[in-house]
Amino acid sequence: MSIVVTEVESVHGDAHRMIFYRCQDHLGAWHSYGPVITVDPAFDAEAYKPTVAVKVAERLAEEEAAKVIV
């Protein structure tokens, strides 16, 4: 399963931020990820999107593998 789009869905807070993401797979389905919680003012939510895409793709691959094994 490949991720084709990753978006910052919402950001909540100032000093203590919660960032929610969503990823769209190659079939058009959306998958939520988060919250990513940070107190680092230098944390770049946009720059973190590739990491989120990898994590979501890994989770989807694990879910697919679990369906095949069962």
Image (spheres, rainbow, N blue to C red):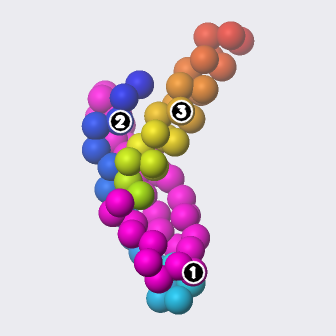
Q: Amino acid at mark 2?
A: Ile
Mark 1 crowd level (few <14, some 14–19, many ≥20, 10 Å Cα): few
Q: Is residue 30 above or below residue 9?
A: above
Q: Amino acid at mark 3?
A: Glu
Q: Which residue is mark 1?
A: 39
Residue 7 screen position, x and y as percent: 32, 56
User: Given this view, does label 3 or label 1 mark the residue nearer the observer?
Assistant: 1
Magenta residues (range): 18-47
Which residue lies at the image location 55% right of the left edge and 64% below the top edge? 35
Mark 3 crowd level (few <14, some 14–19, many ≥20, 10 Å Cα): some
In primary-sequence order, the first of circles 3 and 1 is 1
User: Given this view, does label 1 or label 2 mark the residue nearer the observer?
Assistant: 1
Residue 55 screen position, x and y as percent: 52, 42
Q: Which residue is mark 2?
A: 3
Q: Which residue is mark 3?
A: 58
Label 2's element?
strand
Place residue 4 in its image quadrant.
Answer: top left
Label 3's element?
helix
Which residue lies at the image location 35% right of the left edge and 60% below the top edge? 47
